[in-house]
Image (cartoon, grey):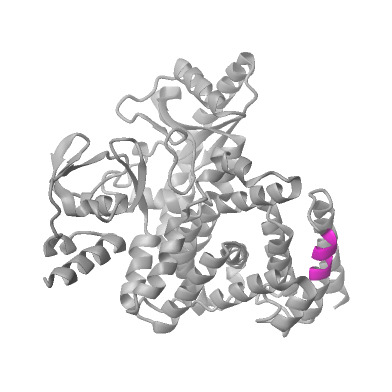
């Protein structure tokens, strides 16, 4: 027990030294830590370590994401009510009602257990989770930090539970992190769950990818040294690094019919990443890169700075003929864009905290391009609205899995506006996402300038133009056979009920 106490004290002392350098309320966090140590006294996790060490790891991750004091405190205290015998009233009196509300929200969504899409208890808990998110997104940030550490210690859980927890992570938490723009968290959760859910496939990818990683790494390193030299000579302040493609993402790509396990068709198995200070510098770097290495003409450049993804992701991607004619992807972004790409909505909260500390007005903060992507998390509000509208559990589960948390594509209007749709979406889904009333005027549609069928499945990057009738017509019933989004389905059904069809 003495050894445990020394370990616990030593780990927290190291954390406290970090806290003191970052302007958070160290007194409040110290108080939360002492409370958690007492609440979890004598408790151990399945791994054998003191239970309170998990609370510390969650708090450290939230601090790493630059979140505010209340969120870090809630992270440290998140298990004290459910597992530590504390009362909600204790938290409210000791740390304020906002912290108690956050812990209460995390406690509620921690009860989610994946037992199949028809399980009423699971779906009801899922509803609670999205309601808690709609009230305060910090609830889900604490939960993601909690899940991340739990996945890192999944080996300590009973074998029979490991796959279920890993499946839950792949199906709910990793997609949720992606929708919140937290790319690094999504990738970590995917890779941690991968060997438990698909052990044979994981082993195959690890084995077959080793020589490709090794060979590509040599070429990328040569390009990195050359690029660093040229960028330094140009006077641009920059950082150049290599980024390995995560294993789960690599496996999903290898499984695609157009790839069919041909590693030579994967151009980002290791990508180069260039970080600079301003958006203008990003375009300067793009010109420098294309002066050194010829861009691949049939793949093109993806400019997510001019047209950010709906989850806030901004970067320029270009694929070039690198060393030995190997096609290599290079990503160019600012430091701020990189922080957003890695930590998403968590980075947004960090800026909100900065606003409060430094007296920056809402108006000034909203002018930051970094922040605009998160002012309209419409899908979170939509999920909360669906709570009231969709009473059938299986229908709600379908809406969550195949719409809100499905893999996404990004398509454009002729004016360049970007729309976020699930894979398999059609021009009619696009019409409903633009405006529910637009669907009643659809005469025909063009995709990338060519007439297309209304049920054509769209791909990322498509430009969709709706050709309109002069008069409104109720949507036909057969649209229900091919639309993918919950919004389209519900609006079509609503229109059909009105006309008695």
Instruction: Tell me residue 20's x, y (percent).
Output: 84, 52
Image spot of residue 373 (x, y percent): 50, 46
Residue drawn at x 34%, y 61% as measured from the top left: 403
In this image, 425 relative to 185: left or right?
Answer: left
Above or below — where is 70 with respect to 341? below
Image quadrant in which the N terminus is located: bottom right
* Position of residue 282 measured from the top left corner of the image (x, y, whole percent): 53, 27
Residue sitting at 72 percent across and 75 percent down?
A: 51
Which range of residues does the magenta coloring cover?
A: 26-32
Residue at x 48%, y 60% (from the top left corner): 176
Q: Is residue 411 above or below residue 179?
A: above
Relative to 225, residue 209 above or below: below
Please state which of residues 491 and 213 is positioned toward the viewer in this rendering.
491
Q: Residue at x 71, y 55 (%)?
A: 63
Look at the image and tell me in which quarter the C terminus lies.
Answer: bottom left
**Is residue 120 left or right of 36 when viewed as pictured?**
left
Instruction: Count the numbered circles shown.
Output: 0
Q: Give yes or no for residue 29 being in the magenta stretch.
A: yes
Q: Is residue 139 left or right of residue 83?
A: left
- Residue 474 is left or right of residue 54, and the answer is left
Residue 187 placed where, x, y %?
51, 53
User: Residue 198, can we see it?
Assistant: no
- Residue in the foreground of this view, choosing between 19 and 11: 19
Q: Main secondary structure of the magenta part?
A: helix
Question: Is 493 contained in the magenta span?
Answer: no
């Amino acid at each position: 027990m003495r050894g445990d106490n020394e370990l616990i004290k030593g780990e927290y002392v190291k954390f406290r030294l970090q806290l003191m350098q970052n302007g958070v309320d160290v007194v409040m966090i110290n108080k939360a830590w002492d409370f958690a140590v007492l609440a979890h006294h004598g408790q151990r996790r399945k791994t054998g370590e003191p239970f309170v060490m998990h609370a510390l790891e969650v708090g450290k991750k939230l601090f790493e994401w630059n979140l505010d004091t209340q969120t870090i405190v809630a992270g440290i205290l998140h298990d004290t009510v459910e597992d530590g015998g504390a009362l909600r009233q204790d938290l409210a009196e000791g740390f304020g009602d906002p912290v108690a509300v956050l812990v209460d929200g995390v406690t509620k969504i921690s009860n989610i257990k994946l037992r199949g899409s028809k399980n009423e208890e699971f779906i009801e808990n899922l509803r609670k989770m999205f309601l808690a998110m709609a009230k305060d997104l910090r609830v889900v940030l604490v939960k993601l930090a909690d899940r991340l550490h739990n996945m890192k210690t999944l080996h300590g859980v009973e074998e029979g539970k490991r796959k279920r927890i890993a499946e839950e992570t792949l199906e709910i938490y990793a997609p949720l992190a992606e929708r919140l723009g937290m790319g690094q968290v999504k990738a970590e959760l995917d890779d941690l769950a991968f060997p438990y859910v698909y052990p044979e496939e994981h082993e195959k990818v690890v084995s077959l990818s080793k020589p490709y990683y090794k060979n590509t790494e040599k070429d990328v390193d040569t390009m990195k040294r050359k690029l660093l030299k040229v960028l330094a000579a140009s006077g641009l302040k920059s950082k150049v690094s290599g980024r390995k493609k995560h294993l789960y993402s690599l496996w999903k790509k290898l499984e695609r019919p157009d790839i069919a396990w041909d590693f030579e068709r994967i151009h980002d198995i290791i990508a180069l990443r260039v970080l600079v200070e301003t958006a203008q510098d990003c375009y300067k770097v793009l010109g420098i890169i294309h002066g050194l290495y010829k861009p691949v003409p049939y793949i093109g450049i993806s400019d997510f700075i001019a047209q950010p993804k709906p989850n806030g992701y901004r970067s320029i991607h270009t694929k070039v003929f690198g060393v030995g004619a190997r096609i290599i992807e290079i990503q160019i972004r600012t430091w701020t864009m990189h922080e957003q790409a890695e930590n998403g909505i968590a980075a947004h909260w960090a800026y909100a905290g900065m606003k409060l500390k430094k007296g920056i007005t809402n108006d000034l903060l909203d002018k930051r391009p970094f922040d605009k992507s998160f002012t309209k998390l419409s899908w979170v509000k939509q999920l909360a609205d669906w709570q009231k509208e969709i009473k059938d559990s299986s229908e709600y589960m379908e809406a969550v899995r195949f719409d809100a948390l499905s893999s996404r594509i990004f398509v454009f209007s002729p004016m360049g506006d970007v729309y976020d749709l699930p894979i398999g979406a059609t021009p009619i889904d696009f019409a409903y996402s633009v405006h529910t009333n637009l669907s009643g005027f659809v005469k025909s549609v063009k995709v990338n300038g060519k007439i297309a069928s209304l049920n054509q499945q769209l791909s990322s990057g498509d430009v969709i133009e709706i050709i309109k009738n002069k008069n409104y017509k109720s949507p036909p019933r057969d649209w229900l056979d091919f639309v993918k989004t919950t919004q389209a389905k519900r609006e079509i059904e609503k229109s059909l009920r009105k006309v008695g069809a």
